[in-house]
Image (cartoon, rainbow, N blue to C red):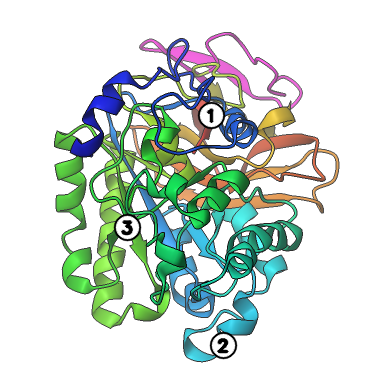
């Protein structure tokens, strides 16, 4: 990045107001072109920059091999409520078969998985093979993106993740090892014409300025080796010191038993750091927009700060909940006759965005909850649910559920909190945050 120090100093700000990001009016000093409309849509989907209030952020990426992801990694992501960006190939089921294959994860199943668990899908080419001609480049990049969009109609395909292909390395593109490679080589130009943003192989931690273009071509730390996965905490702590973010990547089929154990330990640590308010876990797209010096982050539930302003669209009265305040906090309190507490909202420009449902709860007796994010008009079109057991305690416990809102077919979404068993329950500050 030192090569671009002068350019970065001259980059026009993408921020207008606290926590708000938008695409630049002109390419300015960036040594590559970019698709203004796609970038604007990407930023709008997330509601601007994602403020982390001084916390570092991490993102996880899975590179294809989805048979093993489905069997082994998906349960870990669900257990620790950790989103992932899946680098998918448009011809993946055909070109990846067997133990290291992807044919058991059909595109409809991948789409369902992404919606219900807050996963993001990125274009990782058509076949993961070299393209030594202009025609082949268009097949691997441009046509692959359209094919993925047709196969996954409820998900936006906004990011490109360059595959390591060998041979001519996409006619010299070499995975996007420099900013200028996105303009110099046809592969780079095709990527920026047909995608909002791209990762690459530029080393170092990720900018947390809220300016997505500053993360073009940024690389990852590969953690499918146990020795590297055990060092995951060190990488996060190093990024913290630099006020930066970090992206981790694994290939499911490269993870042996030792690496899986190390990865689960790292997932557990990241989840505990998130619950303690010291770390944010985002998608790769979310990390592109992360801004460490802001606390502003788009919330589809309206940011009512623990029911400070009353029910604010929640059905508390009809569901027989009550409002309560203590020690400066504002809560919804379950009663003996309470039913599910819910709020509806329109998706609008935020359709297709990955979101983090976050709240704090307290139960002196212990309670089992069902958290749902569903299509308010027809749950058969979209429904994501998570059951959580909250132990009896005098302190509040943070809860997290990640979902991806459908790009098409759903107009209004409902967030619902339903106690299934147990007694006393206080709910504080439900939010549906950009992730």
Q: Which residue is labeled 3 in the image?
A: 267
Q: Along the polypeptide, which appears first: circle 1 or circle 2?
A: 2
Which portion, as a residue range, is magenta?
307-331
Number of residues whose C-alpha sits closer than 10 Å to that of mark 1, classed few (under 14), some (14–19) or many (20 or more): many
Q: Which residue is labeled 1 in the image?
A: 431
Residue at 32% in and 57% down? 267
Count of residue discs:
3
Q: Please indicate whether residue 250 sits to the left or right of residue 102 in the image.
A: left
Task: State the CA–CA distance, disc 3 to disc 1.
Answer: 23 Å
Is 96 drawn above or below residue 407 in the view shown? below
Q: Please indicate whether residue 375 sits to the left or right of residue 16 in the image.
A: right
Task: State the CA–CA distance, disc 2 to disc 3.
Answer: 28 Å
Q: Which residue is at the front of the view, 117 or 341? A: 117
Task: State the CA–CA distance, disc 1 to disc 2.
Answer: 41 Å
Is 268 drawn above or below residue 322 in the view shown? below
Residue at 30% in and 71% down? 224
In the image, which is nearer the foreground, mark 1 or mark 2?
Answer: 2
Quarter holding the N terminus is top left
**What x and y, as percent, mark residue 345?**
72, 27
Q: Please indicate whether residue 201 sits to the left or right of residue 93 in the image.
A: left
Q: Mark 1 falls on what kind of element?
A: strand
**What x and y, as percent, mark residue 86?**
51, 61
Q: Main secondary structure of the magenta part?
A: loop
Marks 1 and 3: in contact by CB < 8 Å?
no
Q: Which residue is labeled 2 in the image?
A: 97
20 magenta-colored? no
328 magenta-colored? yes
Q: Mark 3 falls on what kind of element?
A: helix
**What x and y, as percent, mark residue 169?**
41, 68
């Amino acid at each position: 990045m030192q090569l671009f120090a002068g350019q970065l100093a001259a980059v026009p700000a993408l921020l207008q107001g606290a926590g708000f990001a938008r695409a630049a009016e002109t390419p300015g000093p960036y040594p590559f072109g970019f698709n203004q409309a796609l970038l604007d849509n990407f930023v709008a989907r997330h509601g601007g920059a994602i403020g982390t209030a001084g916390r570092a952020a991490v993102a996880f990426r899975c590179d294809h091999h989805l048979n093993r992801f489905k069997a082994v990694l998906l349960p870990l992501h669900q257990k620790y409520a950790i989103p992932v960006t899946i680098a998918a190939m448009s011809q993946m089921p055909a070109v990846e078969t067997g133990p290291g294959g992807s044919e058991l994860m059909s595109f409809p199943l991948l789409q369902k998985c992404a919606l219900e668990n807050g996963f993001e899908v990125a274009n990782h080419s058509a076949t993961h093979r070299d393209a030594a001609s202009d025609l082949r480049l268009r097949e691997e990049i441009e046509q692959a993106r359209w094919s993925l969009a047709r196969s996954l109609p409820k998900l936006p395909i906004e990011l490109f993740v360059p595959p390591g292909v060998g041979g001519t390395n996409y006619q010299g593109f070499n995975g996007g090892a420099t900013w200028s490679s996105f303009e110099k080589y046809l592969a780079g130009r095709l990527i920026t014409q047909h995608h909002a943003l791209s990762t690459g192989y530029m080393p170092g931690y990720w900018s947390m300025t809220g300016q997505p273009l500053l993360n073009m071509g940024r690389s990852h730390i590969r953690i499918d080796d146990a020795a590297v996965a055990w060092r995951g905490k060190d990488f996060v702590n190093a990024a913290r010191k630099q006020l930066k973010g970090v992206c981790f990547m694994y290939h499911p089929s490269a993870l042996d038993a030792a690496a899986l154990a190390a990865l689960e330990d790292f997932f557990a640590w990241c989840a505990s750091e998130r619950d303690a308010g010291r770390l944010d876990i985002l998608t790769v797209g979310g990390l592109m927009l992360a801004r460490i010096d802001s606390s502003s982050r788009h919330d589809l539930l309206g940011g009512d700060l623990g029911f400070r302003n009353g029910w604010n669209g929640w059905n508390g009265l009809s569901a027989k909940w009550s409002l309560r305040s203590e020690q400066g906090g504002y809560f919804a309190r379950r009663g003996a006759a309470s039913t599910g507490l819910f709020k509806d909202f329109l998706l609008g420009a935020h359709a297709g965005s990955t979101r983090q449902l976050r709240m704090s709860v307290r139960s002196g007796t212990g309670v089992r909850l069902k958290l749902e994010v569903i299509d308010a008009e027809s749950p058969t079109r979209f429904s994501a649910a998570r059951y959580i057991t909250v132990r009896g305690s005098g302190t509040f416990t943070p809860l997290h559920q990640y979902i991806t809102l459908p790009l098409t077919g759903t107009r209004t979404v409902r967030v619902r909190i339903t106690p299934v068993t147990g007694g006393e329950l206080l709910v504080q500050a439900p939010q549906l945050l950009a992730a």
